[in-house]
Image (cartoon, rainbow, N blue to C red):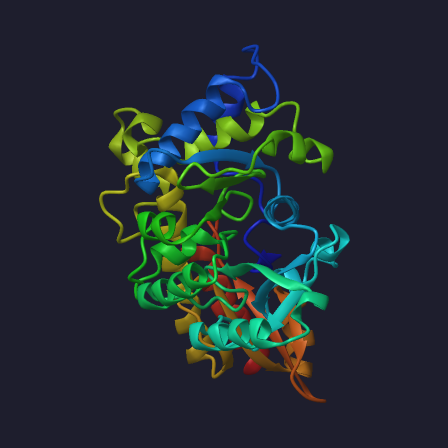
């Protein structure tokens, strides 16, 4: 069955599997102290234009959010996010389980509004009883947002300014960061994110790796004894090399991964269908392929007459389907439930990834035609 269920339903890019196999028998120190993690961290510093950055590798997004925020926040503080934020909706109370409250503000296209954030903070500190309340101790955003939308550079700068005025760290969830950076109508770069946030992570699990997230403290401000904190949370991987090898491959120069056979390079990196030329890294090539296929996906869904619940420039597309159409289409295509729209219609999500092919798009187009026009 063709799948648009999510961007981690297939395993890992073949070049990552090759790198894991090629280094499999090389002994390496544990807990992220190996040469692979060191090389990956240096390549990430270069990509971020942040030579002083601290880089730490964890295995999954929810784990990363819980570990980082619990390390940043004092015991009396919570974290501010949009009410659609992943930490508020789809992480099973992981942040609250660390003893920190999630403080939500209304979403605007899945995003926080800087003026609204400032109003909330000003109101909090103006309240004569605020010493008896949960303090806002950090600000959480996701780029792309949980709805596939993107912050503009101006919006990020406005949020940064508010955080500076209230001395709050700005933390960016980058589970799908590559897809946001590859989107056609973005003016945000990886160095911009490194410049404007206090900590963010680069998602590998949803970006072509088997698993793994690279946490970046761009100004070298990783909390004291962070490794010890990670271990205390049960999140320290003994075979840290598994994460290092994957990110070292994702951020290696593309030419160094594929040798001299340019036709083979194009095929394996996905560059034959992508407009990103030249492609500096595998991470960027993976994202470009997903964005190209997402544009094809939008065209197919639009031509089929589907109504969009939210417009997204990234690899997640949300559409409204009649329930009977949903049930029929689900016999041929995998997609994910998002929410009930009304009694007869449902919002579903289609997602592209590194492994989505033009043939997948054609198959979806055929399935939609057969379902809608039997």
Image coordinates of residue 308 in percent, x first then y, are 49, 80
Image coordinates of residue 343 in percent, x first then y, are 72, 89
Q: What residue is drawn where x is 62% and y is 43%?
A: 71
Asked whether 371 or 66 is in front, the reply is 66
Asked whether 281 or 188 is in front, the reply is 188
Q: What residue is drawn where x is 53% and y is 71%?
A: 121
Task: Answer above or below: position of 258 versus 63.
Answer: above
- Outermost residue, left side: 278
Q: Quadrant of the C terminus?
A: bottom right
**Residue 94, picture quadrant:** bottom right
Task: Answer above or below: position of 79 versus 9.
Answer: below
Task: Answer above or below: position of 67 versus 309.
Answer: above
Q: What residue is drawn where x is 57% and y is 34%?
A: 224
**Residue 50, picture quadrant:** top left
- Outermost residue, bottom side: 343
In screen coordinates, is 102 left or right of 33? right
In screen coordinates, is 341 left or right of 92? left
């Amino acid at each position: 069955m063709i799948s648009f269920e999510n961007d981690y339903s297939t395993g890992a890019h073949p070049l990552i599997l090759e790198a894991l196999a090629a280094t499999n028998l090389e002994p390496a120190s544990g807990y992220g102290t190996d040469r692979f993690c060191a090389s990956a961290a240096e390549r990430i510093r270069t990509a971020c234009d942040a030579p002083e950055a601290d880089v730490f590798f964890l295995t999954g997004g929810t784990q990363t959010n819980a570990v980082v925020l619990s390390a940043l926040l004092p015991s009396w503080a919570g974290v501010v996010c949009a009410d659609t934020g992943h930490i508020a909706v789809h992480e099973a109370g992981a942040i609250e389980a660390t003893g920190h409250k999630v403080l939500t503000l209304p979403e605007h296209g899945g995003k926080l509004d800087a003026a609204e954030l400032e109003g909330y903070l000003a109101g909090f500190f103006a309240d004569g009883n605020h010493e008896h309340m949960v303090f806002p101790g950090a600000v959480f955003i996701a780029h792309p947002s949980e709805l596939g939308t993107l912050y503009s550079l101006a919006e990020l700068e406005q949020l940064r300014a508010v955080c500076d005025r209230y001395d709050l760290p700005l933390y960016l969830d980058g589970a799908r960061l590559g897809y946001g950076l590859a989107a056609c109508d973005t003016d945000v770069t990886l160095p911009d994110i490194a410049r404007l946030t206090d900590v963010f992570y680069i998602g590998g699990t949803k970006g072509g790796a088997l698993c793994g997230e690279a946490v970046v403290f761009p100004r070298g401000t990783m909390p004291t004894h962070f490794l010890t904190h990670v271990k205390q949370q049960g999140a320290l991987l003994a075979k840290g090399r598994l994460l290092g090898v994957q990110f070292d491959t994702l951020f290696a120069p593309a030419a160094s991964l594929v040798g001299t056979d340019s036709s083979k390079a194009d095929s394996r990196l996905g560059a034959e269908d992508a407009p990103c030329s030249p492609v500096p890294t595998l991470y960027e090539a993976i994202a470009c392929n997903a964005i190209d296929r997402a544009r094809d996906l939008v065209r197919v869904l639009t031509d089929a007459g589907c109504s969009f619940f939210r417009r997204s420039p990234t690899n997640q597309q949300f559409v409204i389907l009649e329930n009977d159409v949903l049930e029929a289409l689900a016999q041929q295509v995998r997609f994910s439930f998002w929410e009930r729209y009304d009694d007869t219609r449902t919002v579903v999500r289609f997602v592209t990834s590194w492994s989505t092919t033009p043939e997948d798009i054609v198959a979806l187009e055929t399935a939609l035609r057969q379902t809608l026009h039997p």
